[in-house]
Amino acid sequence: NQLSAIISRDDQQKTKFTSLQDLVQANNNEQQPITFVVVRNSAIFNYLSRSQDPMAKQIYESIMNNKKKNPEELLVNTANEGVDLVYRNPGYAFLVESTFAEDVIGQNCNLTMIMDVNSLFPRNFAIALARGSPYLERFNQAIRELKARGQVELLRQKYWTKICNKHGQILVDADIDSR
């Protein structure tokens, strides 16, 4: 799970952005100014506001010192509000964790996601066990085996809500049922 930006498929096709770094660079060069949006007081917002990473600083400063928009408009209250902003307005990029972005773009064929190839905001998920649990190593081993066999990815594909293919086209019901 890593930082990603949800943008409109049209914006991505026009600009050919392939990474979050491309979005930041374009913003710096003002070739295609991108308006970054983030959920107020979220883990991502807090990370960007405190980070010493140059790219994170640039993103944070572009939100807080935006020449066209008041920063309050770029700090949304909910993830749905951020998705809606991108959906309705060209040139916006909503910063979220990749897991959320995958779910959103699977349900909104006009949106796509741009990944952070440098893992600026790396996150992992875990199963919580009590400290000293005798099951810890068993769980770790089982998870490693499931990952190695590709089972985790198969489960994700099977159960993740998805109505769009990788080209942004709506899957027909038969395609959805055959997953």
Image: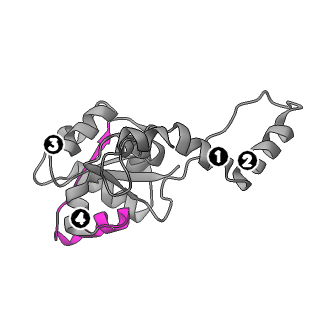
Q: Is residue 70 visible?
A: yes
Contact, CB < 8 Å: mark 1 with mark 3? Answer: no
**Residue at figure coordinates x 81%, y 30% from the top left:** 131
Q: Answer yes or no: do the residues labelled 1 and 2 have beta carbons within 8 Å?
A: yes
Q: CA distance from mark 2 to mark 4?
A: 36 Å
Residue at the spot of label 4 = 13
- The range drawn in magenta is 17-39
Left or right of residue 104, residue 67 in this image: left
> Left or right: where does residue 120 sit relative to residue 48?
right
Q: Residues within 10 Å of mark 3 (few under 14, many from 20)?
A: few
Q: Amino acid at mark 1?
A: Val
- Amino acid at pointer 2: Leu
Residue bearing the label numbered 1? 152
Name the residue located 33 percent from the left edge and 34 percent from the top edge.
79
Circle nearer the viewer, 3 or 4:
4
Give me the disc on residue 146. Answer: 2
Name the residue beneath numbered marker 3: 88
Based on the picture, tell me whether residue 31 belongs to the magenta stretch. Answer: yes
Q: Nearer the viewer, mark 2 or mark 3?
A: 2
Q: CA distance from mark 1 to mark 2?
A: 6 Å
Amino acid beneath label 4 = Gln
Q: Secondary structure at mark 3?
A: helix
Which of the marked residues, 3 or 4, is nearer the chain's N terminus? 4
Rendering coords of residue 114 (x, y %) = 36, 58
